[in-house]
Image (cartoon, rainbow, N blue to C red):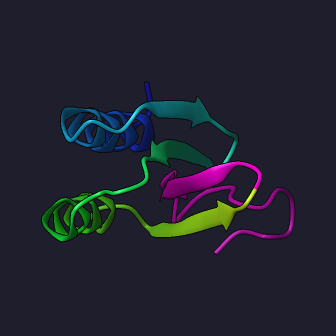
Amino acid sequence: MPASGVSAAAIAARLSSLGLPTRVEEHRRHTSVEAEVPDGLSAASWREVLDVVAEADRFGLLATSLNGRTLWAVVSRTVPTTGDVGGSGHQR
């Protein structure tokens, strides 16, 4: 598992320990975590949740009247800074 997956799994575990059901997905350039946020989450719990997702590279909240609230966080995979990064002609 890439380092992004390990970090995302740690975020997911911490969110789960706060009572939020989570999903982790590996993608080509990042690993994502999604968590369903229940109605009535206390202010103290929100602070804890925000502390957790602050460990990610990006995070946000998607709220709709149809699907409720989904918190998402993305941990980017590390991009090499030397070598054949972009293929032929794109070396540093």
| Residue positioned 56% across, 53% down in the render | 70
What residue range appears in magenta? 66-92
Q: Position of residue 69 (x, y in %)?
A: 57, 56
Which residue ends up furthest to the top in the rendered image? 1
Is residue 32 one of those drawn in magenta? Answer: no
Quarter containing the C terminus = bottom right
| Residue positioned 48% across, 67% down in the render | 59
Q: Nearer the viewer, residue 19 or 80?
A: 19
Image position of 48 (left or right of 10): left
Q: Where on the picture, by quarter, is residue 61?
A: bottom right
| Residue positioned 34% across, 37% down in the render | 12
Secondary structure mostly taken by the magenta-highlighted segment of the chain: loop
Image position of 73 (left or right of 92): left
Q: Position of residue 26 (x, y in %)?
A: 60, 33
Q: Where on the picture, by quarter, is residue 18?
A: top left
Q: Nearer the viewer, residue 51 or 19?
A: 19
Q: Nearer the viewer, residue 36 or 1?
A: 36
Q: Position of residue 38 (x, y in %)?
A: 42, 47
